[in-house]
Amino acid sequence: MALEDLVFLDEMALLLGMMWLLGRSQRSERLYDSKPFYRGSRVSVIGAISSQSILALKP
């Protein structure tokens, strides 16, 4: 099988409403905050590439 004949397919998902679990505060002060219930949307992305180019990208 030649390298030019190979196509790689990948799928991934993104959660648009994700929040960081860590934060920053002034030195020697504690950080307090609340994390709201997750309300963001989810996006799935599928892509295909070959050794020459990107063949498909579907969000």
Image: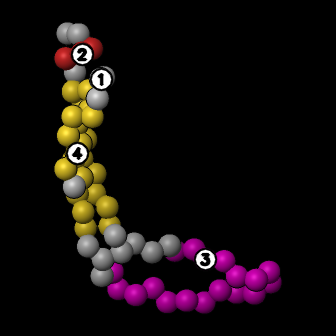
Assess whether mark 3 and mark 2 are in contact (beta carbons under 8 angstroms). Answer: no
Residue 24 in picture, x, y percent from top left: 66, 77
Marks 4 and 2, the one that precedes in the sequence: 2
Q: Amino acid at mark 3?
A: Gly
Residue 47 in picture, x, y percent from top left: 24, 42
User: Is residue 37 something one can see in this rendering?
Assistant: yes
Marks 4 and 3, the one that precedes in the sequence: 3
Marks 2 and 3, the one that precedes in the sequence: 2
Q: Amino acid at mark 1?
A: Gln
Label at residue 29: none
Circle 2 residue: 4
Q: For numbered disc 2, what is the local secondary structure?
A: helix
Kindly report the distance in space between the C-alpha atoms of the residues bearing marks 2 and 3. 47 Å
Task: Give the extent of the magenta segment.
Answer: 21-38
Kindly report the distance in space between the C-alpha atoms of the residues bearing marks 3 and 1. 42 Å
Label at residue 57: 4
Circle 1 residue: 52
Confirm whether the magenta stretch covers residue 10: no
Towards the viewer: 20 or 7: 7
Q: Residues within 10 Å of mark 4 (few under 14, many from 20)?
A: few
Residue 50 in picture, x, y percent from top left: 26, 26
Residue 39 in picture, x, y percent from top left: 30, 82
Q: Residues within 10 Å of mark 2 (few under 14, many from 20)?
A: few
Towards the viewer: 35 or 47: 47
Q: Is residue 55 above or below residue 21?
A: above
